[in-house]
Image: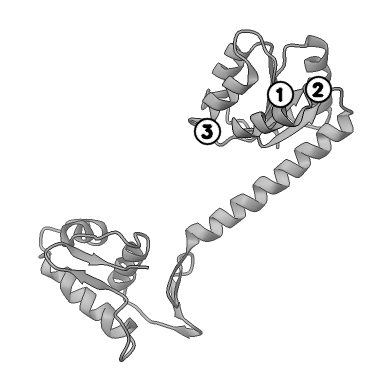
Amino acid sequence: MQNILIIEDEKNLARFVELELKHEGMKTEVHLDGRTGLEAALDEEKDWDLILLDLMLPELNGLDVARRIRQVSNVPIMMMTARDSTIDQVSGFDHGADDYITKPFEIEELLARIRALGRRIDIENEKNRVQQTTLTYRDLVVEKENRVIRRDNEIIELTKREYELLVELMSNLNVVLSRELLLNKVWEYDKEVETNIVDVYIRYLRNKLDKPGEESYIQTVRGMGYVMRT
């Protein structure tokens, strides 16, 4: 975490934290009240990696700041406050905080918590990346990065159009997709392509994917389109 916003009304503490974080090679910006801090937090050009947020602030308290940030952003928030009751901590988490450190604190503890929060965020981002690049349905797995389709340990060979059609269906499980929508997504509304080409490619996919005696992976919804249902 390299770009950190500090919203803290105790000038000496804010300055101390700012200097220590800069010593660790991080970029910082300090605001001493909730209203200007919120404006900075919502500035998309700042691209914050972490917000250190005091609970008791002038103009706008920390809970309101956190709540408003969470309406538009998932940036990590660590509360810094002297109020250490369980109710205060729960309220902080309920308003969107990711961590909570109680004043007074040692700078080593703050740095350790920042590193730990960074690791958690990295792990979550990696999980999301894997989820975004891998699609699963029943025993089908699509590895989007290398365009491989697997059923159990078997690799299924598909043409480019068949692959794109399958990905569109698997990306919208339980959503009925019309022929026109599929044509738009897969063929990008090539004027020379008729909508019945979708039916032809659905048949190609079924021939390659379906197992004898088992329900088809792709269901037809009469008069509407196609769907893969969980």
Nearer the N terminus, badge 2 or badge 1? 2
Nearer the N terminus, badge 3 or badge 1? 1
152 relative to 53 in the view: left or right: left
Nearest the eye: 88 or 166: 88
- In 3D space, how far apart are the residues under numbered discs 3 and 1 (Cα atoms)? 19 Å
Residue visible at 79% across and 38% down in the picture: 113
Quadrant in which the N terminus appears? top right
- In 3D space, how far apart are the residues under numbered discs 2 and 1 (Cα atoms)? 9 Å
Q: Are marks 2 and 1 in contact (CB under 8 Å)?
A: yes
Query: Which residue position is annotated with label 3?
Result: 73
229 relative to 62 in the view: left or right: left
Q: Examine the rendered structure and indicate whether residue 21 appears above or below residue 157.
A: above
Q: Nearer the viewer, mark 3 or mark 2?
A: 3
Q: Residues within 10 Å of mark 2 (few under 14, many from 20)?
A: many
Mark drawn on residue 28: 1
Q: Identify which amino acid the numbered label 3 is placed on.
A: Ser
Query: Which residue position is annotated with label 2?
Result: 17
Residue visible at 10% across and 65% down in the picture: 194
- In 3D space, how far apart are the residues under numbered discs 3 and 2 (Cα atoms)? 24 Å
**Residue 24: x %, y % from top left:** 82, 32
Q: Examine the rendered structure and indicate whether residue 140 appears above or below residue 214.
A: above
45 relative to 56 in the view: left or right: left
**Residue 27: x %, y % from top left:** 71, 27
Quadrant in which the C terminus appears? bottom left
Residue visible at 60% across and 13% down in the picture: 60
Q: Residues within 10 Å of mark 3 (few under 14, many from 20)?
A: few
Q: Secondary structure at mark 2?
A: helix
Mark drawn on residue 129: none
- Colouring of the image: one colour
